[in-house]
Image (tube, helix red, strand yellow):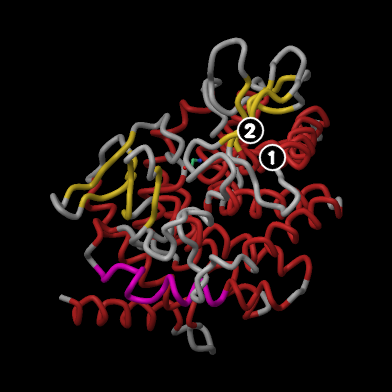
Amino acid sequence: MRKLTLLLIMALLVSVYSCKDTKPTEEEIKLQEAALQYHTLVEGLAGADRLPRSYNKETDELITSGTSWWCSGFYPGTLLYLYEATKDTLLYKEAMRVLSVIEPEQYNTGTHDLGFMMYCSFGNAHRIAPNDHYKEVLVQSARSLASRFNYNVNSIRSWNSGPENFLVIIDNMMNLELLFWVAKETNDSELFNIAVAHANKTIAEHYRDDFSSFHVVNYDPESGEVKVKRTHQGYSDDSAWARGQAWGLYGFVMTYRFTNDKKYLDQAIHVADYILSHPNLPEDLIPYWDFNDPEIPNVLRDASAASIISSGLLELYSFEGNKQYLDAAERIIARLSSSDYLAEAGTNGGFLLKHSVGHLKGNSEIDVPLSYADYYYVESLIRLNKIKSGK
Ligand code: GLY
């Protein structure tokens, strides 16, 4: 089976690269292998109007979600990245099918995750093949997201809660990409200002002096005052939950991309340095699920945090030129591409990466594949390939 898969990969590579005078790069080969692995995921989903979320290896079951789950954009987004890298039309067709499934979410004003859901999906689709319809979906999605902004708090509401609370999580930095993109495309200064205000408030209230981040800040929605800073998915209120640090890093590099304001680049550099110099970061740079779990080293790693960090570091390097960030990203990608993390073809339910942690304390998605770990791993491969090939 393994031999047959390898032969298939070689045949594909020959056909894709026969018109080029150069050999495929290491990253291009990995992307081809990833595209083939995603055929397994496409087959497993079998045309359902649901999205792959994870996989249960004990029961050999694909775990899926509905469209309103925060991860619904990652599967089409990964398919689109892989199509872009390999021209595998089966993946493009599947992406198009799934886009129409998640499209109604553009009107969802009950979540802050529209950036993940709609930008990773429709944003990539529009980048590859721009069209007015995708743009309209993105504009509507941005409006829905912006409806959650509160001018007293100067932030977008993350999680819904009682009227006396206004919860913002560090993850929300990621959703600003949708606002920034639509603001730029449509010259909408209000959307731009909302995204900037949210980023500024996040620097002011989520970050500690050492540039680690709280997970959740609860504000008074009337006065805008901070009520409490705490965790939800991390080890403790004062700890550094690994994926939260990853979202912050990526979010501030992206904010710099759209604003050109050095304040955000500096913030990203501080966060990157916090992560990379942390005494509890293992030698292979795949973080434990929380930097401050006292049971380290006998605790789980989080491949999803690693893949988000590697992608963020690559964009940081592209702006900043510090080779330390490129080297770190390359080491993370190499480790994620080893058989300890990268699934053997046809296994893992068709997901690429093993060993992510969704919500340890909530006893949910522990040491499993997750759609977003795959998305940012593939994005990392594409970004690294661009940097190395100078394209
Ligand atoms: N944004 C949710 C998470 O990172 O688990």
SS for tag 1? helix
Q: Residue at x 58, y 34 (%)?
A: 230
Q: Is residue 379 visible in the rendered structure shown here? A: yes
> Is residue 366 left or right of 324 when viewed as pictured?
left
Q: Amino acid at mark 2?
A: Lys
Q: Earlier in the sequence, mark 2 or mark 1?
A: 1
Q: Residue at x 53, y 26 (%)?
A: 111
Position of the C terminus, as image quadrant, is bottom right
Residue 206 tag number = 1
Label 2 sits on residue: 229
**Label 1, ligand 1: CB separation under 8 Å:** no
- Which residue: 75% across, 74% down? 322
**Viewer-proximal residue, 27 or 23?**
27
Residue 144 forms part of the magenta stretch: no
Q: Residue furthest front?
A: 294
Count the marks: how many?
2
The residue range painted magenta reads 330-345
Examine the rendered structure and indicate whether residue 346 appears above or below residue 76.
Answer: below
- Circle 2 residues within 10 Å: few <14, some 14–19, many ≥20: some
Q: Nearer the viewer, mark 2 or mark 1?
A: 2
Q: Is residue 336 located in the magenta-colored stretch of the structure?
A: yes
For the N terminus, give its image quadrant: bottom left
